[in-house]
Each structure stands twice: as C-alpha cells, then as structure tokens.
Amino acid sequence: MSQQPPADRSTAPPSRRPDASMLLLTNVMEHSLDDGYAEASARRAADGRAGMPRTLKAKLGFAACLVLAALVVTLGAAQARVTAPVLAKERQELIDRIDAETDAADTLESQVEEIRDDVSSRQRKALEEHGGDQGELVALLSGATPVHGPGVKVVVDDAEDTDQGGGGPRETSGFSDTGRVRDRDMQRVVNGLWESGAEAIAINGQRLTALSAIRAAGDAILVDNKPLVPPYTVLAVGDGKKLGAAFRESADGQYLQALKDTFDIRTSIAVQEQLSLPAAPSLIVRTAEPYKAADTGKGTS
C-alpha cells in the first residue's frame, strides 16, 4: 500500500482577518454608498450631467431658485422683526395680569385668615365664659386653648425602602407598598394615645379635637383636610412615664411595633418633660337644649 506523502507544513494556511466576524459592519463602513446610487452617479458623470448646470436655461432656473429662497428668508426675518415687539408686549401684559391676580388672591387669603382667627378667638372666649365651673376642662378637651406640660413624643416615618412585601398587619390592605405609613396607622396611634391617658394630642403641629378626622388622599395623609408630610410627629400631653408605658403595652402600641419589625417603618417613642401644643385652628361651638315633648292635653296612664 502506497503511503501519501506528509503534508508540507512549511506552507501555513492564510491567517484569518481580525475583523472576520464583523464582515457586515466592515462592508457597510467601506461601501457606505449603495451600489445603485454609485452606478447612477457614475453614469451622470459620464454623460456630463454632474456638477453645476451648463446650459443657460438651467443656470437661469438655478439662479431663480436661489433668489426665491433668499426672498423667503428675508421676508421671514422681516416679519419676525415686526411681530417681535407685539409678542413681547402681549407677554408682558399677561405677566402683569398674573401678578395682579396673584396679589389679589394673596390679599383675599390674608383677609380670610384674619376673619377665621377672629371667629376662632370669639368662639374660644364664648366657650370659656359659658362653660360653667368646668369651663377650663371643656376648653382643654375641645382644643380651644393651647396646652403646655409633660408628655410623650411619638415619631412615625416611612421605611427607607418602601417597596417591600409581606403579611402581618397589612396582609389584607391591598397595597403593594407596605413600607409606607397609612392613615389607619396614624388613627391607631392617636386612638392608642387617647386610650392610654393623653389629655391633648397634636400631629405635626395640627391640634386634634373630638371632631378631627384622619384620612388619606392618594399617598398623602390628611388631618382635618390638611395634608401632612412625613415624618409624622405626634405630641401627647399627659403623665409622660405612665403614658409611654401604657401606650407600649396597649394593642395599638404593639401594632406600631409590629409595623417596625415587619415592614421597617421607622418609629420612636420618647418621654418629654415639657411639650407645647397650639390651640385648634378652627373650632365649631354647638349648643343643645333639652327636648320637650309636645303637650297633647291627654294624661298618661
């Protein structure tokens, strides 16, 4: 059996191009002009039609196009120069009207605040005068007067990472963002403090009364229709040590601790030697009279 001669290793195969894997990209870069366009350009150059127009008619048409373009640009610039002062004047008039209406709205708002303060002051005075022997207590419980004294300070804030999941106290809430403080959380905190012996409560400087409402509007928490911004600082006046201990042991205090442990909602409770709570911004005074049954002239059996 004849043996094949060994391959000549001195003649190595041609080396592979470094950009062999990018042939399509290389072809696009080297031949950016489409073949059809290149052929048309070469044919026009061969026929003598490439470059500037050669005949007189073509030159006149080209010059007319240039003149027309220049005329359009000139007319546009002239019109812009003419209308610029008019637009600037209208813009200034609009700015002046906005400033005037803003000043008028600010004035009306200031007047409303003055009238509201005057009405609230008269209502508080009437409440203190006609409250009888318990006038001071009624004024305190109704939020008609400012309060100073010891108490506790409770701070509640959203979790640093508010995109968390889980169950616990929020397993039926229907919200995906369980690290955000809700209106019902603040309701439980306030109710727990009242139940633990608080004499007066305020949230972010907003005094609470028996008619106060804590609600939600989107992601915002409203207290008496006024939006609050986290962190939510709750000040409760009372016997600080007893109030703090009673709140921690209450069901609402344990609920707040569960929110902290489960959802990383940031909370803190601290006893304060001196707190200052403002009076309620608006107070509605209501009176009641004993019900008198109508006299029908018939005796009772």
Image (cartoon, grey):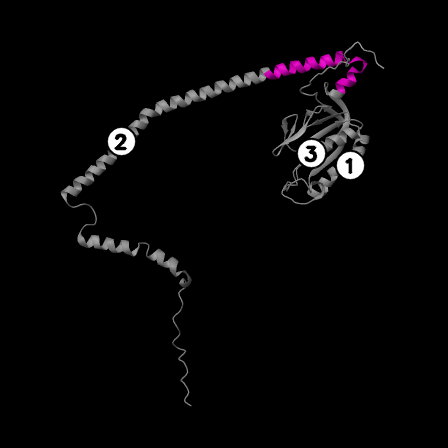
Depth check, mark 2 against mark 3: the one in front is 3
Label 1 crowd (10 A; few <14 / some 14-19 / many >=20)? some
The main secondary structure of the magenta stretch is helix
The relative height of residue 77 versus residue 96 in the rendered view (above or below) is below
Q: Secondary structure at mark 1?
A: helix
Is residue 104 found left or right of 190 in the rendered image? left
Tell me the CA gap for discs 2 and 1: 81 Å
Please provide the residue range marked out in magenta: 112-140
Q: How many marks?
A: 3
Give the residue at mark 2: 74
Label 3 crowd (10 A; few <14 / some 14-19 / many >=20)? few
Give the residue at mark 1: 251
Q: Position of residue 150 (x, y in %)?
A: 78, 26
Give the residue at mark 3: 184
Depth check, mark 2 against mark 1: the one in front is 1
The relative height of residue 140 versus residue 231 in the rendered view (above or below) is above
Q: Secondary structure at mark 2?
A: helix
At label 3, which amino acid type do we have?
Arg
At label 2, which amino acid type do we have?
Thr
Q: Nearer the viewer, residue 7 or 134?
A: 134
Q: Secondary structure at mark 3?
A: helix
Residue at 75% over, 18% down = 139
Q: Position of residue 131 (x, y in %)?
A: 77, 14
Please check the rendered image and state whether residue 127 is part of the magenta-colored stretch, yes or no. Answer: yes
